[in-house]
Amino acid sequence: MSARFPPVRVPFATLSEALLAAPQEKPFVTMWLDDDDERTFTFGEFTRWSNAQAVSFKEHGLGKGDTVILIMPQGVALMAAFAGAMLLGAVPAILAYPTFKVEPAKYRFGLAGVSANLNAKLVVVDESFPAEFLESVSLSDQSKLIRAHSSPPTSGNGAVTHVPSEPEDLAFVQHSAGTTGLQKGVALSHGAVLRQLVHLSHALQIRPSDRIYNWLPLYHDMGLIACFILPMVYHLHVVMQSPTDWVLQPRSMLHLISKYKCTLSWVPNFALSFLARRVKSEDRRDYDLSSLRALINCSEPVRAESMDSFAAVFSPCGLQPMALQSSYAMAENVFAVTQSGMNGGTPPRTWVDGAKYQSERIAVPVEKGSGPCFVSSGQSLPNNEVRIVSEKGHTLPDGHVGEILIRSDSMLDGYYNRPDLTSLSLRDGWYWSGDLGFLLDHELYVTGRKKDLIIVGGKNIYPQDVEEIAFSHPAIHDGRAVAFGCYNADLGTEEIVLVAEVEEPSNLGNSSAIDRAIRGAIVAELGVAPRTIYLKPPRWIVKSTAGKPARSATREKLLAEHPELRIS
Amino acid sequence: MADFAQQLIDYICKEIIRRPGVQIGVDTPLVSSGLIDSFSLVDVLSKLEEVTATRIPAGKVQPKDMDTVSLMLSTAQRVGKPRR
């Protein structure tokens, strides 16, 4: 913990102590599949399940300080395994469960890399985990792989297995967003997590009657911290479903908020557009969203049109004008850096001089509606500081766009077993986020990414990964492909656009088959479908002076040829 | 059933894929091939309910059950409830 911040009074010394202090009869988690298939676990039932997991893990040799990898579907079994590991003083890390879209070779590669880096004593998978992936888990001589039961124990009122931890001991490792092969394990202490939760609960004025709705995956910081650890520590009820169930039935989110009178929820920006568009008008009368105190837009740049379309569609359902809020968060800070609405009101908006913004990267406010609009992600939480710096690292004044640096008392200890990456990102106590933005009157406006990252529905995609896939096709000239993100206002998120040069002009006659092959490979490896693939003749892509594809210039050339990409 | 399949194929090509020259059959992988993305499945599911005149309950369908038109129709048969 940085000595520069005043000490914070945390409610418990460790996360496991918070769980053990919970009121036994209070509902903790409701896992919902549909109205005929839902189950609620009280804190008492959940603690007993966690304890049973702790006993099992201990029998398999897991002890204090050991890392344990959990690869299980979204559900209470996963949460109990996570809490069970913490009861033993062990350090759990959740990895994404494979979906049907994933390319087995790619998943195996990522899994092998992450599991080797974590050097886990135990790897826990569910009973249905595909056997074809098991061989990729990197096990040392001292580590073991086990399958966990997906149902709660039928007995187990015995003594709680609890190995006390210290506040600055590692609590868990959460993986920063990104494709599996590039994921970095963010190591967080109990103290850092608890300090973050104190600040967040203060900002949100958390009260015992709050109830959280969640469909976000628990391997993502928004799902893990805001929708599992926060309610576990503050003894709140969380109503949960899986991300895949939500994608197929987005209206179920509205149904559950109405049914359980949920007060808090976090979603990426695209979800607001998605819900506004996909929920039929005749279904809307079934929903009552008046209980929502805060629906927090987080993990993608906040878009005014997404907020507005959601508000317009769901205000008749009782959505309160103040409910739509925003936040800037990252795993490296446990979760939130900023939060809107702390002083009342909705996130401020600012309209800026478009020409000045494009040419000089300076946000000069203009009259409402007469330039591009940015929505604030809020102000810094207590004991969190934000600084905007130039390429050379000089602090920039208000309104100037630069890289966002953060400093707080809830920062990561480092990337797990990666001191090289830690020293690159953590310098003089500041975390260099790689995100771009500007400050204006203490409000943080996030404008994009420094490193060409594409954010599709809250999922980070590196353009280099997309380009590598294109290069692997025999008809594509090796090294001659450029991928970038293109914002789709209809969806409220970016989509992947790929432009690639073919080896021979004659290959263009086979465009349809090439498109299909590359498209399929991108989905298999990255889990998202590109919007459009443009195949171009040799020497079409703009090269830099070093002879490499110039991403920005190629993007501009493509947008000039295909203006429809700008319009959407 | 063949008529249901053709209605779904027409809808997916015209309203979801919207790229000239792309043709699909009942067994063409859709999501796993990248022809459509997961976020389009909610529209396809609604169309499936409409075409088969069923109500398909939440939580009983996974994206993998929707990867081809054949799988969609099997899913509707397996979990769909007649619309009242």
Image: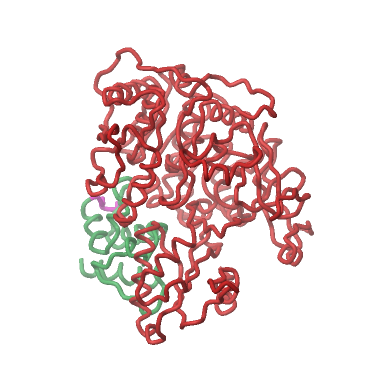
Chain colours: A red, B green
Name the residue rendered at 36%, 61% in the picture: B44
Q: Is residue B45 left or right of residue A452?
A: left
Considering depth in this image, is A79 or A122 the residue closer to the camera? A122
Residue drawn at x 22%, y 46% as measured from the top left: A131
Relative to A514, A354 lies left or right: right
- Residue A252 image position (x, y, % from top left): 41, 45
* Of A495 and A140, the residue lying toward us: A140
Q: Position of residue A200 (x, y in %)?
A: 60, 32
| B27 displayed left or right of A445 | left
From the viewer's perspective, tell me whether residue A146 is left or right of residue A83: left
Q: Quadrant of the C terminus of chain A?
A: bottom right
Query: Is residue B41 located in the magenta-colored stretch of the structure?
Result: no
Q: Position of residue A354 (x, y in %)?
A: 73, 65
Image quadrant where residue A303 sits: bottom right
The magenta segment is B79-84
**Vertical comparison of A146 with A301: above or below:** above
- What residue sits 33% from the left and 72% below the top? B10
Taking the spot 75% from the left edge, 48% from the top edge, the residue there is: A395
